[in-house]
Image (cartoon, rainbow, N blue to C red):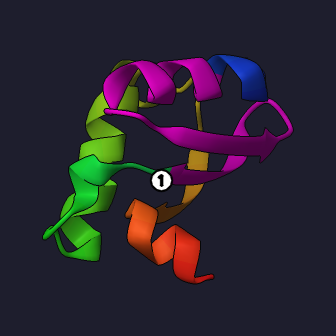
Amino acid sequence: MMNPQQVKELLESGFTDARVEVAGDGRHFQALVVSPDFEGAPMLKRHRMVYAQLREHIDSEVLHAISLRTLTPEQWAAE
């Protein structure tokens, strides 16, 4: 099992100037990832970028499911 802080650290290390918020119960998580790396990328590509950072943990079933919100800094500021 993983804790939200571990997921947060993995995501922060994988994206430029990332703002990451993670909540979860050890196997199911919800994450907000804000990074300029998402500029110009459609939502599906953004999600694939996040899954790539977590692939090892998903494949080993340590991390069972994650719900994502992926935003650019401009989109985050607009909210």
Considering depth in this image, is 78 or 33 the residue closer to the camera?
A: 78
Q: Say if the magenta span includes residue 16.
A: yes
Residue 16 shows in the view: yes
Q: Which residue is mark 1?
A: 34
- Hey, which quadrant is residue 77 in on the image? bottom right
Image quarter in which the C terminus is found: bottom right
The stretch of residues the image draws in magenta is: 7-33
Considering only vertical position in the picture, is 76 above or below 13?
A: below
Q: Report the residue that reaches farthest toward the right.
A: 25
Q: Say if the magenta span includes residue 57.
A: no
> What residue lies at 72% left-to-right and 35% top-to-bottom?
27
Residue 48 shows in the view: no
Q: Relative to residue 52, is residue 35 drawn left or right?
A: right
Count of numbered circles on the image: 1
Q: Report the residue that reaches farthest toward the left.
A: 40
Considering depth in this image, is 78 or 68 the residue closer to the camera?
A: 78
Q: Relative to residue 43, is residue 69 drawn left or right?
A: right
Residues packed near mark 1 inside 10 Å, few (<14), some (14 to 19) or many (20 plus): many
Percent position of residue 62, x then y: 59, 21
Considering only vertical position in the picture, is 74 above or below 57?
A: below
Q: Amino acid at mark 1?
A: Val
Considering only vertical position in the picture, is 10 above or below 29?
A: above
Percent position of residue 7, x then y: 61, 26
Percent position of residue 56, x then y: 36, 19
Q: Relative to residue 56, is residue 24 drawn left or right?
A: right
